[in-house]
Image (cartoon, rainbow, N blue to C red):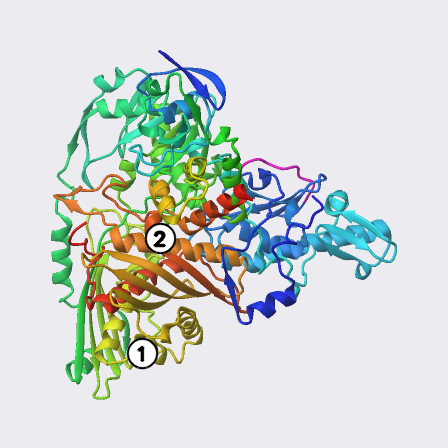
C-alpha cells in the first residue's frame, strides 16, 4: 500500500485553489481509486491497542490507526469526516486509518453541541469534532514526535511527519507510527498543542474516499439486521391499531401453534411473538388475537385535525418573534398578500426497518443497534431492565438510514426490545426485535402535521414592510427531557426557519399555537425547516410576484445584512443561469434559500409540467456554505441525497389517518422518490474559512419551495398543500 | 421439508418451510446476510437476488420456487459486469447508509449482463424498483454508465 492513495484524485493545493476560485464544483467525473481492504470501518471489531493517548485514537504496533467515532454512521459520512479531522492533525496516511464505534459513555463521548448527552443529530458531528478531534490528533502526533526524538536523540524541531511516517532528514532515519507506538505510550499527554494552519491541510478539503464504501458495495457491511448470535431468537411485536390504544386481552393459542414460535409475551407496547426465525415470528404475529382498549385513542381523521388547526390559526397564539408591529402595518398596507399552507404527517421510512438485538440477564444488558442517542438509550434500557445504566452496554452498528427516526428520547425500539427480553425471562437469550415496513409506516413518531397562515403588507413602492405568520402543530420536544427548551410556549423546533427568517422586514410577527393529540411526533430530517422553509420560501415568491419583482432579486435585496445567505443565493442563481431568460413554454425555474444548523443552502430547480399536470424536475443547481469543507464529495453527496429525500416528500409522501387508523402501510401507498424521478443535480461549495457546520440535513430544506416556485413559473399555479396534487391523468 | 438448488455456484439443500420467502432462507438458514429486508412486498428492491440470471425480489418468492434453479446473492457475484458495477460503485462513491446497495448492485448487474450499453431509459426501467432513501440515484445512474464503459474498454 505504498501507492499514494490520493494521487489520482487530489489536485495539489495550488491547483485546488486555482481551479476552485472561491467555489469548488463537485462533479461526478471525479474518480476514486480504492486501495484498501474493506476492514476499515469495522463497527465493533476491536483493533490492537498499544498507544491510546485519548478516547478517540488508538495506534497499534501493526501500524493501524483506529479512530473511535462517537457519532453513528447512518449514511451522512460521519465516520469519514471524523477520521479526516483527526487523521489530518495526526498526519496519518489515509490508507492506515480505520474507524470503530465508541461505546456509550457520556463522560468520554458526549456530543459537545448537545451538552452532556452522547448522540448524533442536528447535523452536528463536524461542528462538534472540529476542535476536539483535531486536538486529539495533534496530541497523538506530538507524543509520537517526542518518542522519535528520544529514540534518535535529536530535537523534535528536526523531525517531520508525513503519511504516518516520522523522519529525521539529517540522519535519514524513518519510523512508522506503529514502530513508535510503545515508546509514545509511556510519555505524558501534552496539555497544549498547536493546530495546523488550514493552508497546510493535506486531508481536510480533499477528495478522500469514504471509509465505509467498500463494505457497502460487497454486502459485508454489518447492520443490526445482520447480527446473528448463538441461540438468538427473533421477535415481532403486535402494536395497537390506533395511537393511544392499549392491550385489553389476547389469545396466544393460534400463534403458539405456529411451528417455530417459542413464546408469546405481553409488554407495555403490545404483544410480542418470539420465535426461532423471522418467518415463524411473522406467521405467529398474524395468528395472534389481541383485543384492544381504544378508549384513550385518537379516533379522528387527519382532515378533522387539520380543521382544528385551521381554526386555531385564527386565535391568539404564543409569540415566537416580534419585530415592530406587523398587524397594524398589514392593515394599513397599500397591498396585501396572504396564503395558508398544509403539511402532512411524514414517516422517516429508513431503508432498514427499526431493529435491535438485546441480550439481557439479571445483572447485565447488551444491545446492538444502529444507535443514534447512545446515552439516552442506555438510560432508558436500564430503567426498563431495572439495572444500573453502567450495566447496559451498547454496540453501535451502521444504521440503514434514520433521518431522525432512531434519535428519540423514548428510545422506543430499544425499550421495546429490552421489554421483550425481560418478559421472555431475562435469561441471556439474545433476542432481535425486528420491525416490518408496515410497523415502520404505521408506527408513529412522524414529522408533525402543520398549518401555516401568512399575511404580508407592501407599501406604495411595493416594498415588503410587514410579515405575519401563524404556525399550528404539535410540539416535538413536549413530554420529554428536551421540554426544558420550550420557553414561553415556543418549541424552537416548531418555528425555526420562520422565527429565524433572515429577510430584513421592518415588522415581523411569528406566532405558534401548539396542539396536543395522541399521535407521537418526532424530528424528521432538517426538523422545523422541513415545513417552515416551504412556507417562507414559496410565500416570499408570491410577495415578489405581487411586487412585480424578480424572485431572486427580491430576495437578494432583503438579505443585505446576511452575507453568507446572500452569497449562496447569488451563487446558485449564477450557476443556474437565472438571468439567461425564461425557459420554453411548459417549463419553469424556481429558487429558494435556507439556513439550517448554521449551514446555508440555495437551490434553483428547473421543471417541466405537462398538460396532465405531471411534474418532472429536470435539474437542480445547489449552492452550499458549510464553513470549511471537510470532504467536498461527501458534502456534494449529502446535497444530492437531501434534494432527493426532500423532493420525494413534497411530491408524494403523506401519512393520513381515517378514524384514527393510518391509511398507508408500505412503499406502494407511502410513496417516496425513485430513480426515474431524480433530477440532475449540480453542487457548488463555497470556499470558506469559517468553522465547519453540518450537511446531513440542510440540503433538504430548499428543494420543495424551489420546485413549487418553478411550477408556478411554468403554470401560474401556486401549491399550498403538501404533497403536490396528483396529476389529472396518469 | 428441504429444497435443493444451486446457491452462489454450490449445490445447496436448505431444510426450511417451503413457503418461507427466499430472502429469509438465504439470510437465516444459509446465513448469507448481504441480501437485505426492506419492505416484504417486492416494493423496494433491497432483497434483490438473481434466479437463473434474472433479478428477482426474494422477499416474496417462496423457497420452494427456486428448487433446481441457480440463485446468486451479493456474496456470489463473479461475472465481469458484476465486478465492473462494484468497481464503479466505489469509484463514484455511490453508497451513503448502504442498506439498499446490495439490491442496487444486483439489479444493476442483471441489467448489464443483459444490456451492455443501457440508455437512461433502460436504467430507469431496470432500477426504478430499487428504492434508496438516501437518494443516491444520480450516482447509481452515473456508475452504471461508467461500468458499461469499463466493460467495453
Residue A4 against residue A358 in the figure, above or below: below
Q: Residue at x 25, y 57 (%)?
A: A615
Question: Does residue B9 appear in the picture of this structure?
Answer: yes
**Dot label at residue A554:** 1
The front one of A385 and B14 is B14
What span is colored magenta in the figure? Answer: A44-51
Answer with mark 1 or mark 2, whichever residue precedes in sequence.
1
Residue B36 against residue A562 in the figure, above or below: above
Is A230 one of the magenta-colored residues?
Answer: no
**Dot label at residue A678:** 2
Q: Secondary structure at mark 2?
A: loop
Q: Quadrant of residue A469?
A: bottom left
Question: Does residue B95 appear in the picture of this structure?
Answer: no
Horizontal side of A166 relative to B25 (left or right) equals: right
The front one of B72 and A104 is B72
Is A49 one of the magenta-colored residues?
Answer: yes
Name the subunit of mark 2: A
Q: Position of residue A243 (x, y in %)?
A: 20, 42
Name the subunit of mark 1: A
Horizontal side of A560 relative to A313 (left or right) equals: right
Q: Secondary structure at mark 1?
A: helix
Q: Position of residue A146 (x, y in %)?
A: 77, 54
Main SS of the magenta part reads loop
Horizontal side of A643 relative to A44 (left or right) equals: left
Please identify, in this view, whether the residue under mark 1 or under mark 2 is nearer the observer: 2
Q: Residue at x 20, y 63 (%)?
A: A720
Amino acid at each position: 500500500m505504498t501507492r499514494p492513495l490520493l494521487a489520482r484524485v487530489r489536485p495539489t493545493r495550488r491547483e485546488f485553489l486555482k481551479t476552485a476560485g472561491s467555489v469548488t464544483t463537485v462533479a461526478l467525473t471525479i474518480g476514486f481509486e480504492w486501495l484498501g481492504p474493506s476492514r476499515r470501518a469495522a463497527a465493533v471489531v476491536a483493533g490492537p491497542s498499544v498507544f491510546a493517548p485519548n478516547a478517540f485514537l488508538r495506534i497499534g504496533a501493526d501500524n493501524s490507526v483506529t479512530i473511535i467515532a462517537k457519532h453513528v454512521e447512518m449514511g451522512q459520512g460521519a465516520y469519514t469526516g471524523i477520521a479526516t479531522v483527526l487523521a489530518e492533525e495526526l498526519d496519518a496516511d489515509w490508507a492506515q486509518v480505520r474507524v470503530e464505534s465508541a461505546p456509550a459513555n457520556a463522560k468520554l463521548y458526549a456530543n459537545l453541541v448537545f451538552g452532556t448527552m452522547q448522540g448524533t443529530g442536528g447535523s452536528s458531528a463536524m461542528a462538534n469534532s472540529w476542535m476536539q478531534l483535531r486536538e486529539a490528533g495533534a496530541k497523538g502526533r506530538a507524543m509520537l514526535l517526542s518518542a522519535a526524538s528520544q529514540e534518535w536523540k535529536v530535537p523534535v524541531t528536526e523531525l517531520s511527519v508525513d503519511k504516518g511516517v516520522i523522519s529525521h532528514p539529517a540522519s535519514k532515519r524513518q519510523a512508522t507510527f506503529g514502530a513508535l507506538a510503545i515508546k509514545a505510550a509511556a510519555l505524558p499527554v501534552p496539555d497544549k498543542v498547536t493546530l495546523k494552519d488550514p493552508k497546510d491541510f493535506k486531508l481536510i478539503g480533499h477528495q478522500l474516499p469514504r471509509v465505509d464504501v467498500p463494505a457497502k458495495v460487497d454486502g459485508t457491511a454489518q447492520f443490526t439486521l445482520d447480527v446473528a448470535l448463538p441461540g438468538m431468537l427473533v421477535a415481532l411485536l403486535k402494536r395497537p391499531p390506533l395511537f393511544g390504544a392499549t392491550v385489553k386481552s389476547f389469545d396466544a393459542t393460534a400463534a403458539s401453534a405456529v411451528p417455530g414460535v417459542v413464546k408469546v409475551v405481553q409488554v407495555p407496547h403490545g404483544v410480542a411473538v418470539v420465535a426461532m426465525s423471522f418467518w415463524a415470528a411473522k406467521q405467529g404475529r398474524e395468528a395472534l388475537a389481541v383485543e384492544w382498549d381504544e378508549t384513550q385513542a385518537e379516533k379522528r381523521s387527519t382532515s378533522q385535525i387539520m380543521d382544528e388547526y385551521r381554526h386555531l390559526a385564527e386565535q391568539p397564539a404564543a409569540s415566537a418573534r416580534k419585530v415592530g408591529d406587523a398587524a397594524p402595518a398589514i392593515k394599513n398596507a397599500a397591498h396585501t398578500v396572504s396564503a395558508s399552507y398544509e403539511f402532512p404527517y411524514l414517516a422517516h421510512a429508513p431503508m432498514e426497518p427499526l431493529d435491535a438485538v438485546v441480550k439481557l440477564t439479571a445483572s447485565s444488558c447488551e444491545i446492538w443497534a444502529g444507535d443514534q442517542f447512545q446515552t439516552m438509550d442506555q438510560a432508558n434500557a436500564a430503567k426498563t431492565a431495572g439495572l444500573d445504566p453502567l450495566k447496559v452496554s451498547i454496540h453501535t452498528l451502521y444504521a440503514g438510514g434514520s433521518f431522525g427516526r432512531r434519535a428519540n428520547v423514548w428510545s422506543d425500539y430499544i425499550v421495546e426490545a429490552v421489554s421483550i427480553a425481560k418478559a421472555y425471562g431475562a435469561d441471556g437469550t439474545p433476542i432481535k426485535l425486528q420491525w416490518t415496513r408496515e410497523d415502520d409506516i404505521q408506527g408513529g413518531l412522524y414529522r408533525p402535521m402543520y398549518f401555516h397562515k401568512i399575511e404580508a403588507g407592501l407599501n406604495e413602492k411595493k416594498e415588503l414592510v410587514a410579515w405575519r405568520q401563524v404556525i399550528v402543530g404539535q410540539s416535538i420536544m413536549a413530554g420529554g427531557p428536551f421540554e426544558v427548551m420550550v420557553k414561553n410556549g415556543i418549541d424552537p423546533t416548531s418555528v425555526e426557519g420562520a422565527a429565524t427568517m433572515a429577510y430584513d422586514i421592518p415588522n415581523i410577527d411569528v406566532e405558534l399555537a401548539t396542539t396536543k393529540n395522541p399521535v407521537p411526533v418526532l424530528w424528521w430530517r432538517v426538523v422545523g425547516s422541513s415545513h417552515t422553509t416551504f412556507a417562507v420560501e414559496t410565500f416570499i415568491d408570491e410577495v415578489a410576484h405581487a411586487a412585480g419583482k424578480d424572485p431572486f432579486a427580491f430576495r437578494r435585496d432583503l438579505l443585505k445584512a446576511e452575507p453568507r445567505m446572500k452569497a449562496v443565493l447569488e451563487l446558485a442563481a449564477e450557476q443556474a443561469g437565472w438571468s439567461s431568460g425564461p425557459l420554453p413554454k411548459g417549463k419553469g425555474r424556481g429558487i429558494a434559500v435556507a439556513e439550517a444548523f448554521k449551514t446555508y443552502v440555495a437551490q434553483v430547480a428547473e421543471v417541466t409540467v405537462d398538460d396532465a399536470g405531471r411534474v418532472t424536475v429536470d435539474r437542480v443547481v445547489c449552492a452550499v456554505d458549510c464553513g470549511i469543507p471537510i470532504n467536498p464529495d461527501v458534502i456534494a453527496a449529502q446535497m444530492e441525497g437531501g434534494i432527493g429525500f426532500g423532493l420525494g416528500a413534497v411530491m408524494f409522501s403523506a401519512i393520513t389517518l381515517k378514524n384514527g387508523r393510518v391509511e398507508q402501510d408500505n412503499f406502494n401507498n407511502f410513496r417516496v422518490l425513485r430513480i426515474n424521478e431524480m433530477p440532475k443535480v449540480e453542487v457548488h461549495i463555497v470556499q470558506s474559512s469559517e468553522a465547519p457546520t453540518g450537511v446531513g440535513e440542510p440540503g433538504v430544506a430548499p428543494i420543495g419551495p424551489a420546485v413549487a416556485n418553478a411550477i408556478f413559473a411554468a403554470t401560474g399555479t401556486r401549491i399550498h398543500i403538501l404533497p403536490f396534487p396528483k396529476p389529472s391523468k396518469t | 421439508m428441504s429444497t435443493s438448488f444451486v446457491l452462489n455456484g454450490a449445490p445447496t439443500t436448505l431444510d426450511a418451510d417451503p413457503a418461507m420467502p427466499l430472502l429469509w432462507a438465504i439470510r437465516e438458514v444459509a446465513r448469507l446476510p448481504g441480501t437485505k429486508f426492506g419492505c416484504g412486498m417486492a416494493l423496494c428492491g433491497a432483497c434483490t437476488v438473481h434466479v437463473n440470471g434474472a433479478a428477482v425480489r426474494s422477499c416474496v418468492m417462496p423457497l420452494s420456487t427456486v428448487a433446481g434453479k441457480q440463485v446468486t446473492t451479493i456474496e456470489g457475484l463473479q461475472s465481469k459486469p458484476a465486478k465492473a458495477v462494484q468497481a464503479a460503485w466505489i469509484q463514484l462513491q455511490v453508497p451513503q447508509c448502504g442498506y439498499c446497495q446490495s439490491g442496487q448492485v444486483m439489479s444493476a448487474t442483471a441489467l448489464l449482463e443483459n444490456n451492455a450499453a443501457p440508455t437512461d431509459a433502460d436504467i430507469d426501467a431496470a432500477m426504478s424498483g430499487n428504492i434508496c432513501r438516501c437518494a443516491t440515484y444520480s450516482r447509481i445512474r452515473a456508475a452504471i454508465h461508467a461500468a458499461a464503459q469499463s466493460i467495453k474498454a
